[in-house]
């Protein structure tokens, strides 16, 4: 019990000393907030021992970390798929095929693409020798040139 009271007293004294040393302003507010959080933690830390239970923060932190990593990986995979989609549209425009809309069906978490749909309803050509059938072949070869899309089902919407 005395260790606990000494810890509380020590952290409060330390926070008062730091508050006197730091100038007034934004940083002082943040430091006070941090010391307030530490003080609360020091005060509640021995409470589980009073109820014969141990506080184990490792499970909480690791599950939180895993959740953050999964969200981060999902966002990265989504960005990759959107970039691939954009690159294909840009490549098609270089080849004279414009206004093609490409969508995909995918499991973003596992970076698994099931199907690519190509909407040709608004398609236009910069080259007069291009027709719809040649455009489909060119679109399919452009999509297949991307390693992630080699074995993916491609469907065209006319």
Image (tube, rainbow, N blue to C red):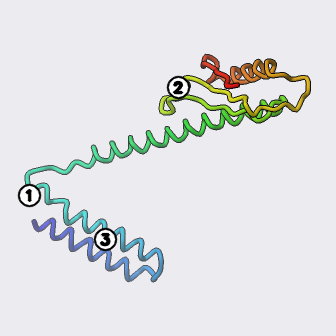
For disc 1, the neighbor class at 10 Å (few under 14, some 14 to 19, many from 20) is few
Q: How many residues crowd mark 3 within 10 Å: few (<14), some (14–19), many (20+)?
A: some
Q: Is residue 1 above or below residue 130?
A: below
Depicted 147 relative to depicted 89: above or below: above
Question: How far apart in space, not on screen, are marks 3 and 2 (Cα)?
Answer: 47 Å
- At a point 15% along the width and 59% down the height, the residue shown is 46
Residue 146, given in percent of the width and then of the height, sits at: 68, 24
User: Disc 2 on helix, strand or loop?
Assistant: strand
**Residue closer to the observer: 117 or 121:** 121
Numbered-mark total:
3
Q: Earlier in the sequence, mark 1 or mark 3?
A: 3
Q: Label 3, on which residue?
A: 36
**From the viewer's perspective, is the residue at label 1 or at label 2 nearer?**
2
Q: Quadrant of the C terminus?
A: top right
Tell me the element at label 3.
Answer: helix
Q: Quadrant of residue 131?
A: top right
Q: Where residue 91 appears, x then y in whole percent? A: 77, 31
Expressed as whole percent of the image width and height from the top left, the position of residue 42 reads: 23, 64
User: Which residue does the numbered mark 2 point to in the structure image?
Assistant: 112
Q: Is residue 95 left or right of residue 88?
A: right
* Residue 4 relative to residue 102: left or right: left
Quarter of the picture holding the N terminus? bottom left
Numbered badge on residue 50: 1
Q: Circle 1 — which element?
A: helix
- Residue extending farthest right: 128
């Amino acid at each position: 019990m005395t260790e606990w009271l000494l810890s509380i007293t020590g952290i409060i004294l330390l926070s008062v000393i730091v508050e006197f040393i730091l100038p007034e302003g934004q940083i002082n507010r943040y430091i006070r907030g941090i010391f307030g959080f530490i003080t609360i933690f020091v005060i509640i830390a021995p409470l589980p021992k009073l109820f014969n239970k141990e506080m184990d923060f490792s499970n909480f932190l690791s599950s939180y970390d895993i959740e953050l990593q999964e969200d981060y990986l999902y966002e990265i995979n989504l960005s990759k798929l959107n970039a691939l989609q954009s690159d294909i549209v840009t490549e098609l425009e270089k080849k004279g095929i414009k206004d093609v809309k490409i969508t995909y069906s995918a499991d973003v978490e596992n970076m698994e693409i099931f199907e690519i749909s190509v909407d040709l309803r608004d398609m236009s050509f910069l080259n007069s020798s291009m027709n719809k059938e040649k455009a489909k072949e060119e679109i399919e070869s452009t999509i297949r040139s991307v390693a992630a899309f080699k074995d993916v089902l491609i469907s065209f919407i006319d």
